[in-house]
Image (cartoon, rainbow, N blue to C red):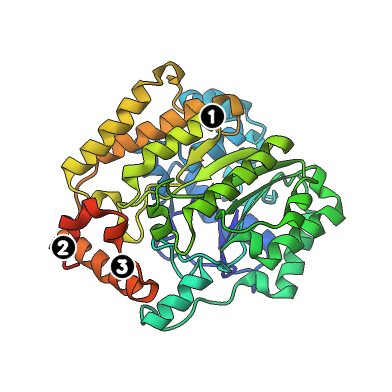
Amino acid sequence: MRIDSDGTFYYCRWIDRNNQEKNETLYNIKETTVTEFFQKKISDIRKKLLDGEKIARCNSCIKMEEQKKVSGRQKQLLKTGIQLDELEETIQSSSFYDEFKKSYFNSGDTTLLPQDWQIDLGNFCNSACIFCSPTFSSKLATEHKKLGLIQDLPKKNWADDPVLLENFINFLCSSKKISYLHFLGGETIITPAFKKMLKELIKSGINKNISIGFTTNLTVWDQEIIELLTQYKEVNLGMSIECLHPINDYLRWPSKISNVKIILEKWLNIAKKNNWLVQIRTTPTLFSIAHLKDLYEYAFEQNIGIESCNFLENPYYMKISMLPIEIRNSIALKIQDWVDSNKKYLTDKTIINTRDKNNLRKYILQDALSYVNYLNNIKEESQQHWKDLVTYIKKLESSRGNSILNYAPEYKELLRAAGY
C-alpha cells in the first residue's frame, strides 16, 4: 500500500502515478478508511491481476524489466516467496497462495490488511532539486510560485492534520502482521510527523516486530531521530545523492557536496554500528548520467546498495533519452568497462534479493548493466524538449544565481543550440 502526500491511497508503492486506469476513482484518507480501500475499493484491480490482465499503472515496472533492471514488482514478489522463473511452483508454495485463491473466487475481495507500506508524509523539504516537483518539495513549491511556474501551492499534506495522523497511527498499531513501513517526504528528518510516528509506534510496542525504511537528502542531522531508530527491529536507510561530482550542488540545490559527503560518512558509520541496511538513492538525469559510474563504484567499494526507483520519465525534459546517441553510447561503454572489470561478481540470476547484504555487489553490477541497456536502446527525444529544458533551468537560475555551464561545460553546444 501507499499513501501519497495529499492523502491519496494507491495499491502499490511502485505505481505509475501518471498513467491512471480508465474510469479509475481515486480515494483519500480524508473520506475512506484503509480497510475499505484495501479490501473492497481495489477489488477490480486485484481481479484483473489475478486474471492475468495488464494494468496501465504497472508501466514503470514493465519498462524496468525490459532493460533487465530488477523492478518493484519483482521485489515485492520475492517477499511473498514467488520467483518468476519458477512461477507455477513458487505460487503454490507461497504462504499467500490460499489468499490468492480466496480473492480470485470472491471477485478480488480480501480480508487481509496491508503488511507493507510506503508512507509519503508530505512535501516539507529544505531542498529544491531541479528534477523534483512542488508536490514533494515545499521549497521548490515556493520558488515555482514566485517564478510563475505554478499558480497555486500543492494541497495540504495529510500528515499535517493531527486527527488524520492520529487515526492512521492507531490503525498501524492495531494492524496484525504488519512488517515494513517506508517513509518518504519531503525530507523525512525534518518532517514533524516522522518523529511523532516513530515515538508512537515505540509506545505501542510494535517497534520490536517491524522494519523501518526512510530516505534522507544528506543535508540535515537529528540525533534524537537516530536514537529512536535504534529501537526498531531493523532499519533500511536510503540516502539521496545524484553523484559525487560538484554538479550534485546544481541538481540538488542548495546542497553542497562537501557537506553532503560529511553527512554521508556519518550515516554510514551509524549504519555499520547498528547493522542497518543502506542504499544510495539516485535519480539519473541527462545531467548526472555521465557521473553514475563513479557512484556505482563508490557503492561497490563500500559494499552498500544503490538503486534508482525507475528510469526517469518526468520531468520529460530531463530524461536521459534527450542525449544524442553518441554521448549515450560513450557513457554506456564506460559503465560496461567498469562492470567487465568486476565480472567475477556477476550472476546469471534474473532477480536478486537486494535485502541480502551478501548480494549487494551482484545487484550493483546488475543495476549498472540495466543502464547500459537503457542508454543503448532508448530512442532520442524531440529537440523541442531541449528548448523546454533551457526555458525551465534559465528561470531557476534567475532565482538561484547559478549556471549549468559552470557544472557541465561539456553540454554547452547542446544547450546553446536550444537557446541557452
* Image x and y of residue 26, in percent: 52, 67
Q: Which residue is mark 1?
A: 360
Q: Nearer the viewer, residue 417 or 349?
A: 417
Residue that badge 3 annotates: 393
Q: Please, is residue 91 above or below residue 393 in the view?
A: above
Location of residue 290 by image quarter: top left
Q: Amino acid at mark 3?
A: Ile
Q: Amino acid at mark 2?
A: Arg
Give the amino acid at mark 1.
Leu
Crowding at dot 1, Cα within 10 Å, few <14 / some 14-19 / many 20+, comes out as many
Q: CA distance from mark 3 to mark 1?
A: 36 Å
Q: Position of residue 369 (x, y in %)?
A: 36, 31
- Asked if 147 appears above or below 367 in the picture, the reply is below
Q: Secondary structure at mark 3?
A: helix
Using residue 310 as the reference point, say whether residue 75 is left or right of it. Answer: right
**Residue tagged 2:** 416
Which of the two labelled residues, at mark 3 and mark 1, occupies the earlier sequence position?
A: 1
- Give the side of residue 15 with respect to residue 332, left or right: right
Residue name at image x 30 percent, y 53 percent:
319
